[in-house]
Amino acid sequence: MQTSLPTSASSSTKPEMKEKCDHRADCLKMIQLILDGEATDQQLAKVKANLESCQPCIEMYNLEREVKELLTKRMEKRCCPGQLVETIKSRILSFS
Amino acid sequence: MSDTPTRDDDQLLPNGDAVEQTPAETPARRYTDEQKYQVFNKEFMPHIDSMYNFAFRLTMDEDDANDLVQDTYLKAFRFISSFEQGTNAKAWLFRILKNSFINDYRKKSKEPAKVDYQDVETTYNSEDAESEHTVDLRAESVSDLIGDEVANALNSLPVDFRTVIILCDIEGFTYEEMAKILDIPIGTVRSRLHRARNLLKEKLRDYASSMGYKEENGD
């Protein structure tokens, strides 16, 4: 697995932060794959690099992550009514 | 009583893979009655809260959610011999619930003039909708939304888009599991999810901007 990122330590040319992304739609798709845990190593490396050099990609990444968190953490989770659990259990018993 | 499912029932059998396997590879599970209850209680019942949430988010009605969950669990018990112990019970159950929803509940849906899903997908499939369609929204704008607002935004999506978001983001299924639950190719899972999220972000943007106005009025 080769995911070595370019190190800018010794170089005097610090990578410029891009203000405009020419591949927004494609980048967005890759970002979603990464947040869903479905990206390939290659996609992962590519987005990693973008997140260090492309402002629109950083913003898209933050938004996608935030929306996913809203869904996982902020939505009310209901418990199945106890009555329903009892009904199912008793109906199952009557099957045999 | 025969263990052989009828042709109709066959559609309910969650393990689509079994069809492609030779009989030798899919021995009929012959559980004793005691084993059936054990599998049911140990592998099926622990998922009942997730199942109830899924049913409620699909039907958006408590009574319908109750009926749907009950029907699903009764079907799961009837077809328990097609469930292989130790495999993915949650995906198996979700698939039965999804099929029951489509077959029994969607037809009698109370929602008037429901948008036909095929139309929606075709619209969003078209090239101009696809190309460079990103929603102009910042993470900070939605970070203060409360659960009810997120739920309302999600509920306003057509059911098939709502479904992929629930399965992926709320229930944490993988694309492969989703493909099996929904009987669609993984590529379709990916693109439907992408479109569903764009729609959701548009709804969230509406909520976020209406909230912005409230703040200006000094609330």
Image: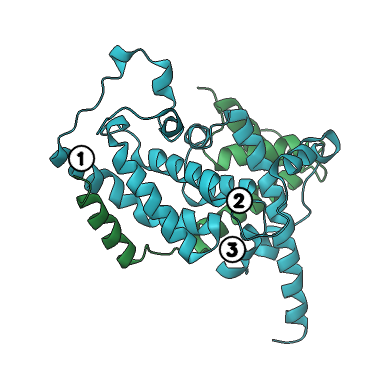
Chain colours: A green, B cyan
Say which residue label 3 marks. Answer: B151
Circle 3 Cα neighbour tier, 10 Å, few/some/many (<14 / 14–19 / ≥20): some
For the point 57% across and 60% down, the residue is A70
Quadrant where the C terminus of chain B is found in the figure: bottom right
Sooner in the amino-acid sequence: mark 3 or mark 2: 3
Which residue type carries mark 2? Arg
Question: What is the CA distance from the residue labelled 2 to the residue labelled 1?
Answer: 33 Å
Left or right, B53 with reference to B160: left
Which is nearer the N-term, disc 3 or disc 1?
Answer: 1
Q: Residue at left 20%, top 28%?
A: B30
Chain ID, mark 3 = B
Counting from the top left corner in percent of width and height, residue B171 is at: 46, 49
Name the element at disc 1.
helix
Rendering coords of residue A40 (x, y %): 56, 27
| Label 2–label 1 contact, CB within 8 A | no
Give whichever of discs 2 and 1 has the lower sequence position.
1
Mark 3 near mark 1, Cβ–Cβ under 8 Å?
no
Secondary structure state at the residue bearing disc 2: helix
| Location of mark 1 (residue) | B36
Q: Is residue A76 visible?
A: no
Q: Secondary structure at mark 3?
A: helix
Q: The disc numbered 1 marks a residue on which chain?
A: B
Q: Residue at x 30, y 40 (%)?
A: B78
Quarter of image, res B6 = top left
